[in-house]
Image: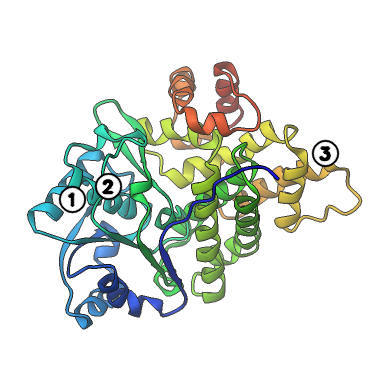
Amino acid sequence: METFTFRAAGEVTFGVGSIQQVGLKVKRHGGNKILLVVDQGFAKSGPLEKITDALKKEKISFVLFDAVEPEPQGETAEQCGFLAKNEGCDFVLGVGGGSAMDTAKAAAILATNGGRVRDYQGLDKVPRPGLPKGMVPTTAGTGSEVTFTAVFINTEEKKKAGINSVHLFPEMSVLDPELTLSLPPAVTAFTGMDALAHAIESYTSLSANPLSEMVSLEAIRRIGKSLRQAVATGSDLGARSEMLLGSLLAGIGLANAGVTAVHSLSYPLGGRFRVPHGVGNGLLLPAVMKYNVLSRPERFARIAGALGEKIEGLSVKEAAVQSVEAVKRLAHDIQVPERLSDLGIPESAFPWMAEEAMKVVRPLENNPRPVSLEEAIGIYQKVF
């Protein structure tokens, strides 16, 4: 039996109506005066009252930070961390998509460690624990509620980079599918493809282990059967529940096995061109799968089966190729952009993009097939 390490975040509460417990959960983890971090869209929505009411019920005071933008900048997290420290907060609660949760995680460590986001971007650069933190995802996408990563844009260098530290693991999270019911179809599609990318990449990663493989494959199965329905009929609570659970499982897989070349190639799209993370991942996922498929055909064949493809009677190679076609059809059906040209990205940018992608080393090390600079350019060209 191989030797491996499996890591997990703190207490996870899942279920319809579970948001009513968030105040009690925060209090149990030491929160009396909290910094409530939400993204700009959620700050204006009715569901926010469910959270604030639950906090008030437990007599928990809160300071609201609602300036989180899509694809957040490091400066945003720094402002948030300063507010937490200046207001004497003892807990940080992130509510929203990946941007809000990543900002909350970074603010928690900045409040105790000081410095700037760029000081900690990389692996294991955070010296001390941050404030206790909890997450409430309102999208089924990033899985940030169970990962040790927070990603930000460096505005000066126009690059995305992540803080990766065990000190970013949330102490608690509450996942209530009802909070995802108001997501528009496009956001549901993009965030859902992000979750699927996490699941497929972590399942095929060279760093996968027997436990991570189980959760990643189950994530693929749940997302594959429910994403179309969640996009088409957003009020379907069953589909929303399956997506949120699939995203959670994909996040656990990601936290243990990491991601692969999809993320390395996607980072320049967000850093320079501000392409939403889920859009970039969804667009690149089929092309990277096609590039990788012959390196681990048995795994890609199992992915095809998990996505509902009829693979009986096919060879392993034929079944593996079906996984790529299944993801292509899914992305097309939910109207995820399929070409870089549709996003206004010029072909002349590909050499620079490939050079930047090659600097995102960790996912490339996990990729089941080596990727050279020329091959990275070739993948971009295939999706132009």
> What x and y, as percent, mark residue 302?
75, 50
> What x and y, as percent, mark residue 155?
25, 32
Give the label on residue 106, or none: 2
Q: In this view, does 314 lie to the left or right of 242?
A: right
The quadrant in which residue 346 appears is top left
Q: Are marks 3 and 2 in contact (CB under 8 Å)?
A: no
Q: SS of the residue at dot 1? A: helix
Decide which of 187, 150 is in the foreground and name it. Answer: 150
Q: Nearer the viewer, mark 2 or mark 1?
A: 2
Q: Are marks 3 and 1 in contact (CB under 8 Å)?
A: no
The residue indicated by pointer 3 is 317
Residue lying at 15% horizontally and 55% vertically, measured from the top left: 84
The residue indicated by pointer 1 is 80
Q: Nearer the viewer, mark 3 or mark 2?
A: 2
> What x and y, as percent, mark residue 73?
26, 40
Q: How crowded is mark 3: few (under 14 residues within 10 Å), some or many (20 or more)?
A: some
